Amino acid sequence: MKVILQENKSSNYLLNKIANILLKREDLYDRVNIIKSAKVPIVKLVEKEHNYNFDISFNKFDGIKQLKEAEKAFDIYPEMKFLIIIAKCILRQRDLHETYTGGIGSFLLFCMVLAFLREVRKDYFKSNRLHELQNMMLSEYLLKFLEFYGIKVDINLHQIIMQDGGSIVQKNNQNSEYGFSLISPQDSTHDIGNASFRIKEIFNVFKNRFNFLTNYNFEEGESILKYLINPSKNVFSYIKEKKN
C-alpha cells in the first residue's frame, strides 16, 4: 500500500522527518526503513495491528493513476487478482519482490500479469477458441504464466508495450545489457522493467517451476501450490465438497 504526501520541501527532508515520527511510535509501526537508493525514495513500514505494508513517498501521483489502471483491469480479467497474489508469494519467499533490490515490485508485477492475460486472449481469439477461456482453471492460467515469462519472453529480444491494448515487439537494440523492458501504461517514455536487474534470476525461477510442474506425477488431490510457495509446514490439498 502506498501513501502519497505533497509539500513544498525536498523529498529527502520529508522522508527523514516522517521516519523519525514513525520510529517514535513503536506501538503502532514496525520495520520503519528509509530507502533513499530507490528511483523514487520512500519510507517503508509495517502497521502492526493488521500487518499491512506501507510505502510513503512525496510529490508523486503515480499511485493514483495506477489505481485506476488496476480497477479497470480487474473488471476485464477477474482471474488477474489470484495470479498476482500467487506470483507475489513466489517472489516474496525468494526475496525477489522489491524493485530497489532488483526484483519485481507490485506495479511491475501487475503490468506483467496484465500483459500475459492480454496475450492469452489474443491467441485464443485468433484461433476462434475464445469461449474456452470461460472454463479455464486458475492452475492452467498459472502454468501458462510461468511458461510465458520463463520460456516464451526473451528479455534480450522482446519489449512489452502496455499502452493501446498492449503488444510485444522486437527491441530496437538487442543488447542484453539493457535487460527487461516493459513500457509504462501511463508514460511511453518510461521503462519500468529495466530497474529489475535480477530479472534473469526471476525468469529462471519461473522456467524451473514450469518444467517441474509439467513433468511431475501428481498424486490425486495434490495442489501445484505445494511446489511454488512454502506453505509454512501446512499441506496444500484439494478438498472435495461434500454432497448432501
Image (spheres, rainbow, N blue to C red):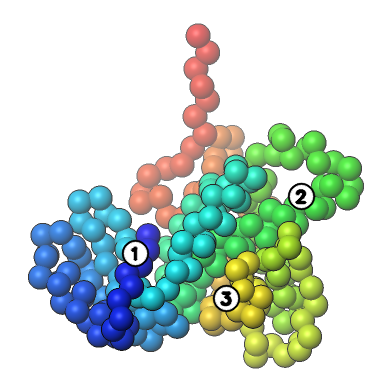
Quick one: label 1 or label 3, which is nearer the N terminus? Answer: 1
Q: Nearer the viewer, mark 1 or mark 3?
A: 1
Q: Determine whether the residue tagged by mark 3 lies in a helix, strand or loop.
A: loop
Name the image quarter holding residue 101.
bottom left
Category of crowding for the residue at label 2, using alpha-carbon neighbours closer than 10 angstroms: few (below 14), some (14–19), many (at least 20): some
> Mark 2 highlights which residue?
121
Residue farthest toward the top in the current orientation of the protein = 244
Quarter of the image where one finds residue 149: bottom right
Q: Which circle's residue, 2 or 3, is located before the other in the chain?
A: 2
The quadrant of the image that shows the N terminus is bottom left
Residue at (65%, 90%) from the top-left corner?
A: 177
What secondary structure is marked by label 1?
strand
Q: What's the distance in space between the residues labelled 1 and 3, CA to CA?
A: 20 Å
Q: Nearer the viewer, residue 69 or 45?
A: 69
- Which residue matches tag 1? 3
User: How far is the residue under mark 2 from the one under mark 1?
Assistant: 34 Å
Check residue 128 in the rendering and tell me which mark sits there, or answer none: none
Residue 10 in the image, given as x and y percentages of width and height: 31, 86
- Image coordinates of residue 216 in percent, x first then y, are 64, 51
> Which element is circle 2 on?
helix
Which quadrant would residue 204 be assigned to in this image? bottom right
Residue at image position (30%, 56%) is: 52
Q: For label 1, count other residues whose C-alpha is less than 10 Å away and answer few (under 14), some (14-19) or many (20+).
A: some
Q: Is residue 101 visible?
A: no
Residue 210 location in percent, x, y? 65, 58
Q: Which residue is mark 3?
A: 192
Amino acid type of disc 2?
A: Arg
3D distance between C-alphas at marks 2 and 3: 24 Å
Left or right of residue 59: residue 124: right
Q: Residue at x 88, y 50 (%)?
A: 126
Q: Is residue 166 visible?
A: yes
* First of labels 2, 1 by sequence position: 1
